[in-house]
């Protein structure tokens, strides 16, 4: 589960900011964006680039206005529903033990959800996530992944505001994601994009750390001069 939902809100703000900026600048904003990416897409025609920009803005809009709120709501409901599920199962267990009459009441009453092992908790977690529609969110991410995998957007536009939420959701729910994948429903596009963006994120993290170390090294050398 995400340690802090703040980065979800931050991603929402980034995408909304892009949306507001485009609304204000209109055609001028799109022209500037096209200009910035033209060198990286020399073989593309002007219309192709403009179409990719339009697709990118559309995808970011869908992600900001629909998917981020849906994922955020899913996470909030999951936390409550999972805790309730454990409490319900604990109460059922206590009632069973009372009927069997083999354990003293004080001992039964002292039982907590800690009695459930990790495997049992994972099973309950999967049931709750399924009830909350995790597969529907995976399906929507699969559809959006097609745009990135088939070069229908400018990836450097969509990646900054989307990748943390995208990667975070898949990884937080990877156990059930891996379970529902099959030959009939492989989630191929989502799998490929998750792998590619995860690698990019790790590379960026390593690059940032390397830059920090290089800056620190320069500072230390200056102090020795």
Image: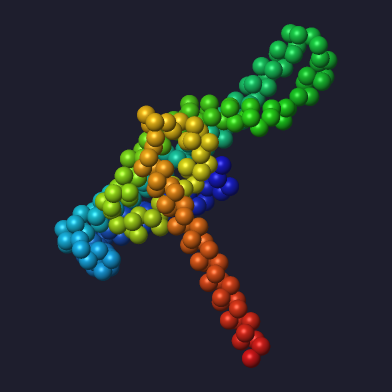
Q: Which image quadrant is residue 222 in?
A: bottom right
Whether residue 96 is situated above or below residue 203 in the rendered picture? above
Percent from the top left, x then y, of residue 131?
48, 26
Whether residue 132 is situated above or below residue 48 in the rendered picture? above
Image position of 101 (left or right of 31): right
Whether residue 13 is situated above or below residue 95 in the rendered picture? below
Q: Quadrant of the N terminus?
A: top right
Q: Residue at x 36, y 42 (%)?
A: 189
Image position of 94 (left or right of 189): right
Q: Residue at x 30, y 57 (%)?
A: 154
**Foreground residue, 87 or 182?**
182
Q: Does the image show residue 167?
A: yes
Q: Residue at x 52, y 61 (%)?
A: 205
Identify the coloring. rainbow
Q: Does the image show residue 9?
A: no
Q: Quadrant of the C terminus?
A: bottom right
Percent from the top left, x then y, of residue 199?
47, 55
Q: Which image quadrant is residue 81 in?
A: top right
Percent from the top left, x then y, of residue 103?
81, 14
Percent from the top left, x then y, of residue 185?
38, 31
Number of disc labels: 0
Q: Residue at x 53, y 36 (%)?
A: 175
**Foreground residue, 111 or 185?**
185
């Amino acid at each position: 589960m995400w340690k802090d939902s703040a980065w979800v809100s931050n991603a929402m703000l980034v995408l909304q900011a892009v949306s507001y900026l485009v609304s204000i600048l209109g055609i001028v904003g799109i022209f500037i964006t096209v200009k910035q990416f033209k060198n990286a897409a020399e073989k593309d025609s002007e219309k192709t680039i403009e179409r990719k920009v339009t697709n990118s803005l559309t995808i970011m809009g869908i992600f900001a206005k629909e998917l981020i709120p849906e994922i955020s709501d899913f996470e909030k409901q999951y936390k409550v529903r999972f805790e309730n599920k454990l409490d319900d199962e604990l109460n059922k267990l206590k009632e069973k033990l009372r009927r069997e009459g083999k354990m003293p009441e004080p001992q039964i009453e002292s039982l907590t959800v800690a009695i459930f092992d990790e495997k049992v908790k994972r099973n309950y977690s999967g049931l709750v996530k399924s009830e909350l529609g995790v597969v529907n969110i995976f399906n929507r991410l699969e559809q959006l992944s097609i745009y990135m995998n088939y070069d229908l957007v400018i990836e450097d536009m969509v990646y900054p505001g989307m990748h943390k939420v995208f990667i975070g959701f898949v990884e937080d729910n990877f156990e059930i994601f891996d379970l529902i994948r099959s030959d009939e429903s492989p989630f191929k596009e989502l799998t490929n994009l998750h792998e590619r963006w995860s690698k990019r994120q790790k590379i960026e993290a390593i690059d940032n750390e390397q830059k920090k170390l290089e800056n620190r090294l320069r500072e230390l050398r200056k102090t020795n001069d």
